[in-house]
Amino acid sequence: MKNFLVNLGIGLLFGVGLVVSGMSDPAKVLNFLDLFGTWDPSLAFVMGGAVVVAFFGYRIVLRRPAPIAGGRFHLPTRKDIDARIIAGPAIFGLGWGLSGFCPGPAITALSLGAASTYAFVPAMIVGMWAARAAIERMHVAYPD
């Protein structure tokens, strides 16, 4: 129950941050990608702020012997680059660029009543399910 509450709190904090920064609005994202039209650099500042917080946050947290709400840290161990590392982000980027949504802001925008999310979120869920089914069919193990 403790892990659930911690995850719920973190998710709510993330969602509030998305709404406050305006990142739940797909027009904001699409304007960031429109370099020669209505370019809006504010997304770069949101991303930059996230990178700075993550940079220092990881250095502070990883000094601990274990996470506060878990038995051990789950950090990636693989360092090689394979087709999944290239294809996954490419597909994610195409979807993000075409729709203006990535999963977190899309879920947040559902609560704001944005009509486009009522089409995007079900398609995203089907896509996630299809990707997992394809990977299981290929017998590829998910890394820890």
Image: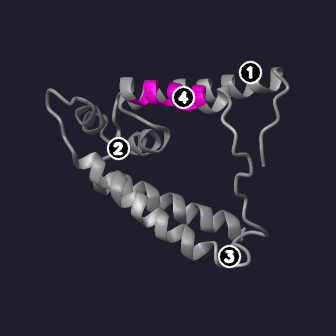
Disc 2 from disc 1: Cα separation? 29 Å
**N-term mark: 4 or 3:** 3
Would residue 70 be found to the left or right of residue 46 on screen? right
Q: Quadrant of residue 53?
A: bottom left
The answer to whether 1 is drawn above or below residue 128 in the figure is: below
Separation of residues labelled 3 and 2 (CA atoms): 30 Å
- Cα distance between the residues tagged 4 and 3: 32 Å
Q: Does the magenta-highlighted stretch encompass residue 91?
A: yes
Type of residue at label 3?
Ile
Q: Residue at point 54% right, 66% down?
A: 9
Query: Residue 68 shows which numbered tag?
Result: 3
Q: Residues within 10 Å of mark 2 (few under 14, many from 20)?
A: many
Q: Nearer the viewer, mark 3 or mark 2?
A: 3
Q: Which residues are magenta?
A: 86-96
The residue wearing badge 4 is 124
Asked where in the image residue 141 lies, by quadrant, the reply is top right
The structure residue drawn at horizontal position 74% and vertical position 21%, both measured from the top left corner, is 134
**Helix, strand, or loop for circle 3?**
loop
Q: Say which amino acid is labelled 2.
A: Ser
Q: Position of residue 88 (x, y in %)?
A: 59, 29
Q: Position of residue 24 (x, y in %)?
A: 35, 44
- How packed mark 4 is, by other alpha carbons closer than 10 Å (few <14, some 14-19, many 20 or more), is some
Residue 134, label in figure: 1
Q: Nearer the viewer, mark 2 or mark 1?
A: 1
Query: Mark 2 or 1 closer to N-term?
Result: 2
* Image marks 2 and 1: residues in contact by CB distance under 8 Å: no
Residue 135 horizontal side relative to residue 26, left or right: right
Q: Secondary structure at mark 2?
A: loop
Q: Earlier in the sequence, mark 3 or mark 1?
A: 3
Residue 24's tag is: 2
Q: Amino acid at mark 4?
A: Met
